[in-house]
Amino acid sequence: MMDEIEKQENSPLILMVDDHPRNLQVLGAILKKHDYAIAVAQNGPQALEYVSTIIPDLILLDVMMPQMDGFELCNLLKQHPQTKDIPIIFVTALDTSQDKLRGFQEGGVDYITKPFHQDEVLARVKAHTTIRKQQIELTLKNKELEEANQTKNRLFSIIAHDLLGPVSNVTEVLKLLVQDICNPAEQKEFLQGALKSSQQTLLLLKNLLFWAKNQRHEIDFNPHVLNLQIMLTDSVLLLEGLAKEKNILLEMHCESGLSCFADENMLTTVIRNLLSNAIKYTGEGGLIKLLAQHSDSSVRITIEDNGIGIEPENISGILDPLTHFSTTGTNYEKGTGLGLSLCVDFITRHNGQLNIESVPGKGSKFIVTLPPQSSYF
């Protein structure tokens, strides 16, 4: 038999394991009186079944039980990653040094002896639930610190390798122009190269700022009804220059009057990154199509190219929000993977989907599906 008393908010959950109902009753009365939530199991298998779905803050474990004694149960719990950190206090009438030593060797943190003394029970339970709470808080803080360090290192890496090069290129072009040592044809060629570098750097900076804010959960989500024709046209105009550099034809087809319910900044970032990505991986004289249409009650935006395509094993890496997947473009363009990572994050915020269809050597389709407005509420 197992039972659980309704847990009050912020109340530590104590699992009591004992084959004697009277012991459970006495301990339960003490703990319940002091606002602890309790659950009970009358043997080892019941306790294992319970912790397979609910992790208590503390286990009070009787040593002498049939089927499986407390030492054996403790050993099993300490071997499993999900339960190994649960503090276990042995409850026993045994009081020899050998018994206590074995309990600590099996992973127990303390002992409560029978017959029970209320003050002793409460003091030991409070001490170990407090320690457990502090351990959890420390683990979370360490995780946040590690994530912050990863973000910082990623930022420094991008600044050092992906921003320094383009900015240096533009600087060198400006030096040549100031020195007036180039003929008009050379000047035009250098300026076109500088423009391309500055456009790529601008997109990277926008991605970098969005990504950094997203890592710190500082981006507000403000969806409203958007005119897709206007938004998509603006994105195409912004990236037309990059497409022309590679003689790529950029076509757009949007259903008349098509709108969607989305955050404008996020969706614009998604479309611009997917278009930029398509340009990067499409060769000279290629074709990119941007198609927006209704699909049942949803809106579907497709970016299709006839570029180099994606190997099947790499698609999962692109869709993994924790992976910054990137390869070199057809003109040896470098990338950071930030753009695709942002796309996955922002589409997820919209309860939408990003699907990828690709054939290596023939091209790729990136399909963004946005749900109807009702799905947000």
Image (cartoon, grey):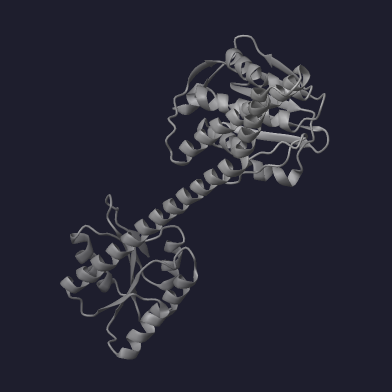
Using residue 175 as the reference point, say whether residue 114 is left or right of it.
left
Question: Residue at horizontal 78%, vertical 36%?
Answer: 309
Residue 10, x across and y down, in percent: 28, 52
Q: Quadrant of the N terminus?
A: bottom left
Q: Quadrant of residue 110?
A: bottom left
Question: Residue at horizontal 24%, vertical 65%?
Answer: 126
Say if 5 sits above or below 364 in the image.
below
Q: Residue furthest top?
A: 256
In-front residue for pair 146/184:
184
- Can you see residue 320? no
Question: Residue at horizontal 81%, vertical 25%?
Answer: 286
Question: Residue at horizontal 60%, vertical 16%?
Answer: 234
Say if 242 sits above or below 314 in the image.
above
- Can you see residue 373? yes
Residue 195, x across and y down, in percent: 66, 24
In-front residue for pair 227/117:
227
Residue 122, x across and y down, in percent: 20, 68
